[in-house]
Image (spheres, grey):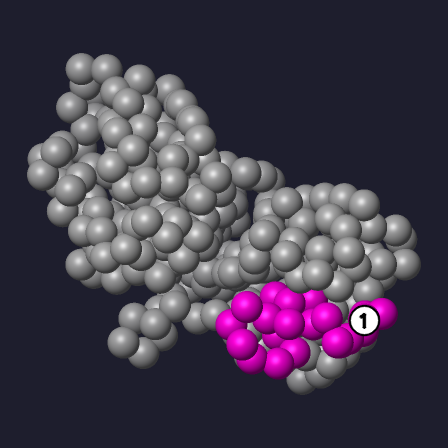
């Protein structure tokens, strides 16, 4: 039976899974991601050995943080400082002798959400609210890319925001008023002095307002049919956050139809399932 391998390399955990032709996961494993490159690769080989067994792998999909060069497969994930200019695709191809498709984690997760949606919307925008914020856009089954393959940075839009300590709105990119600085885990901790799970209802109202303003901009510019939110902050805020942010989006949106906004049904598995998706279908046929 044809087998596919999915790899999700995160700054905290590395996860791998094997699926058959139908995409259903048959075996999976995960472990903490070591800080060093050599230790990280050894951990990856160990995890792959746990799930692969002796079966040949037809192709491999990989999700990892950016920045990276998806065509060459050279990665330099921001939150893994010891992984710089690593030719990860070539390393995997040499070791396993099969095709390797690699991309930014949010693009991969968007592909996973698209494949898991029974409707397969023509325009699907995926957003993750976690330590930071990012997104991926799938149009007619193809991952959207900007000029020169630039990855769109949806978190670094400026919005009219609401928060109790505006002097603490500082984005790690250096620009002023970024959405990420207001609704990400790091931004929330900086502004409110505590983690998202410790916020009170008034604080969550601020987060919902700011997220809703960002959704308004994204809906007006990208005109997606569906927006899916994932990540620890979005999942922690839950349906109340999504409903309140959607109301703000709708109340401030003009001229274009409002998209459906919902929480991810895949939870923390979006990127892992997305990696299996690109392994099975490639970048442009998810």
Mark 1 closeness class: few <14, some 14–19, many ≥20 residues within 10 Å = few
The single residue placed furthest to the top in the displayed view is 54
Q: Quadrant of the N terminus?
A: top left
Front-most of 107 and 14? 14
Q: Quadrant of residue 221?
A: bottom right
Can residue 20 be seen by looking at this rendering? no
Q: Image check: 27 left or right of 260?
A: left
Total numbered labels placed on residues in the image: 1
Secondary structure beneath dot 1 equals loop
Front-most of 250 and 46? 46
Q: Main secondary structure of the magenta part?
A: loop
- Residue 18, compared with residue 214, is above or below; it is above
Can residue 37 be seen by looking at this rendering? yes
Q: Please tell me which residue is depicted at 82% across the width and 50% down the height of the picture.
A: 199
147 magenta-colored: no
Q: Image check: 97 left or right of 277?
A: left
Q: Please tell me which residue is depicted at 54% across the width and 76% down the height of the picture.
A: 174
Q: Pinpoint residue 157: horizontal percent, then vertical percent.
A: 58, 77
Give, as a single range, the part of the protein colored magenta: 161-182
- Residue 173, compared with residue 281, is above or below; it is below
Q: Pinpoint residue 253: horizontal percent, then vertical percent.
A: 72, 78
Q: Image check: 3 left or right of 155?
A: left
Q: Pinpoint residue 105: horizontal percent, then vertical percent.
A: 41, 51
Front-most of 242 and 122? 242
- Residue matched to label 1: 165
174 magenta-colored: yes
């Amino acid at each position: 039976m044809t087998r596919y391998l999915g790899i999700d390399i995160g700054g905290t955990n590395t996860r791998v899974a094997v699926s058959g032709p139908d995409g259903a996961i048959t075996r999976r494993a995960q472990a903490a991601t070591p800080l060093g490159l050599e230790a990280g690769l050894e951990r990856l080989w160990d995890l792959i050995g746990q799930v692969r067994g002796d079966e040949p792998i037809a192709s491999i999909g990989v999700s990892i943080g950016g920045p990276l060069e998806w065509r060459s497969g050279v990665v330099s994930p921001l939150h893994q400082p010891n992984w710089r200019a690593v030719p990860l695709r070539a390393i995997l191809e040499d070791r396993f002798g099969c095709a390797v498709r690699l991309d930014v984690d949010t693009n991969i997760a968007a592909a996973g959400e698209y494949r898991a949606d029974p409707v397969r919307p023509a325009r699907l925008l995926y957003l993750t609210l976690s330590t930071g914020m990012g997104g991926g856009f799938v149009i007619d089954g193809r991952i959207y890319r900007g000029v020169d393959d630039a990855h769109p940075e949806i978190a670094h839009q400026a919005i009219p925001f609401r928060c109790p300590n505006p002097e603490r709105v500082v984005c790690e990119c250096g620009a002023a008023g970024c959405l990420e600085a207001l609704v990400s885990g790091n931004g929330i901790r900086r502004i409110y002095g505590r983690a998202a799970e410790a916020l009170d209802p008034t604080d969550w109202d601020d987060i919902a307002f700011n997220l809703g303003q960002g959704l308004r901009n994204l809906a007006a510019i990208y005109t997606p049919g569906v927006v899916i939110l994932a990540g620890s902050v979005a999942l922690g805020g839950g349906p109340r956050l999504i409903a309140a942010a959607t109301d703000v989006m709708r109340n401030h949106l003009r001229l274009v139809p409002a998209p459906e906004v919902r929480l991810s049904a895949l939870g923390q598995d979006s990127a892992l399932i997305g990696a299996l998706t690109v392994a099975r279908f490639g970048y442009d046929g998810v």
